[in-house]
Image: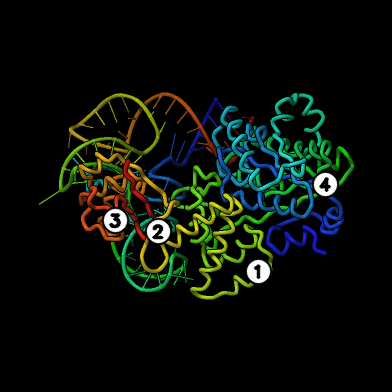
Amino acid sequence: MKDIFDIYKERGFIEQHTDEDALKELFKTQTTCYIGFDPTASSLHVGSLVPIMSLAQMQRAGHRPIAVVGGGTTLVGDPSGKTEMRPVMTREQINQNAECIKKQLSRFLDFENDKALMVNNADWLTTLNYIDFLRDFGRHFSVNRMLTAESYKMRLETGLSFIEFNYMLLQSYDFWHLFKNYDCRLQMGGSDQWGNIIAGTDLIRRLERDVAHCITFPLITTSSGIKMGKTHKGAVWLDPELTSPYDYYQYWINQDDNDVERFLLLFTFLPVEEVQELSSLEGADIRYAKEVLAYEATKVCHGEEEAEKARAAAKKLFGSGNQGMSDSVPEYCMDKAELEKGIPAFILFEQSGLCKTRSDARRLLTQGGGYINNEKIDVFDQVIDLKSGKDGVMLLRAGKKRYMKISVT
RNA sequence: GGAGAGGUUCCCGAGUGGUCAAAGGGAGCAGACUGUAAAUCUGCCGGCUAAGCCUUCGGAGGUUCAAAUCCUCCCCUCUCCA
């Protein structure tokens, strides 16, 4: 029978891991595992989806995941994978973010009856006493050893402050704390976390003479080598307020052909056989597989209803034949009086958010990338007014893919 | 604390008195081609109803008709030494 390790393996979740036999042994009984999420922003984004999905898979396999919100560790800042120290965040910011992230995770994991747990490491880290900590824990860390960690190597070139250097100790302490209090024997994380996690298993071995394990996930880049979850608009957020379900759906459907199989395995719960069938599609047919990917991914994050809406909207806008409207298309409301007067196209494009600045809008329109109700706007300052719309609504389009519905109040 | 190197537009990185809104590359955007994909080609790529004007080259002053470029002070980073 397949255990969670096999599932991870066949779905592409594993980059590195500690001893396989020991892990498989571990998974024979219900296992508690954890992943930390740093509340550096008010929302998680697509880049965190692999760890999130891994926890969800873990829960489906009958184990108990713990999501640790790093309210304490973020006070210090993880240098792993970063070329520069990031600005120190205030406690208020961090706490606020931690709250938001908690809410988001509940959409992916079932926290009923402690089937999954969520804890904040601020609860145990912020009360630590410096001298005690150094004497009881600090002594188990070899600086020589730490300096060989990949996560620090890079920073030794550009600069590493003492505060960040301590991050590894705190994360190790977390692991130890969870081991003691929740019998958590497995920590997972991105591949850049390997050093931090291994430091934790070492600490547990030294303090408790017991074994803990580690699994890391590959850093997911798109086929073009870009980190997952970044677009021209910035990060793709899981929060529907920051990235609408429609945009979220679009993000997935616009993925590179070569990424579809990998992403279906990682970001949906579809059975492997089904994924393989979908990815055997070739040429233009692969669009169908992308549609499934987009739908399923949106469903996992925003629920079935939103996924349906996003799909319907996309079909209307991009489907063959006549283009229509849908609820899910982003909408910009404006004053009726303002529109009655008429407004130059480039200003409207800027105001509605389709373009960042008026210059940007001018550029777009001059280059022939602006449309109203699918008719090209030839002059950048063409006046748009109520008569420009059909039945009181008008649909702006920037380039091939970005739409904005203008509605009047 | 001492010596050296350096901080340039989203990123990398040229530029050492005017010809600099600043080379080149990357990213991004638009157009062509397509399949809401990739690759390729072309154009754009600080802001502003724009052949002009305004704001940028770590910060603050100064020299000059004119400064990213010269001077002074300050801040920050790196390397070596203590």
Q: Secondary structure under badge 4?
A: loop
Q: Chain of mark 3?
A: A
Instruction: Please name the residue that numbered disc 3 is placed on.
Output: A372
Q: Which mark is residue A67?
A: none
Placement of A326 over or under A34, stated as above or below: below
Q: Marks 2 and 4, how far apart in space? A: 48 Å
Q: Is residue A162 shown to the viewer in this render?
A: no
Q: Marks 1 and 3, how far apart in space? A: 40 Å
**Residue type for callout 4:** Ala
N-term mark: 2 or 4: 4
Q: Which mark is residue A274?
A: 1
Q: Is residue A20 shown to the viewer in this render?
A: yes
Instruction: Please name the residue that numbered disc 2 is placed on.
Output: A401
**Residue type for callout 1:** Glu
Question: Are dots 2 and 4 on a single chain?
Answer: yes
Identified at 73% across, 56% down, the residue is A16
Q: Marks 3 and 4, how far apart in space? A: 60 Å
- Circle nearer the viewer, 4 or 1: 1
Instruction: Please name the residue that numbered disc 4 is placed on.
Output: A212
Residue farthest front in this picture = A391
The spot of residue A209 in percent (x, y) is 89, 42
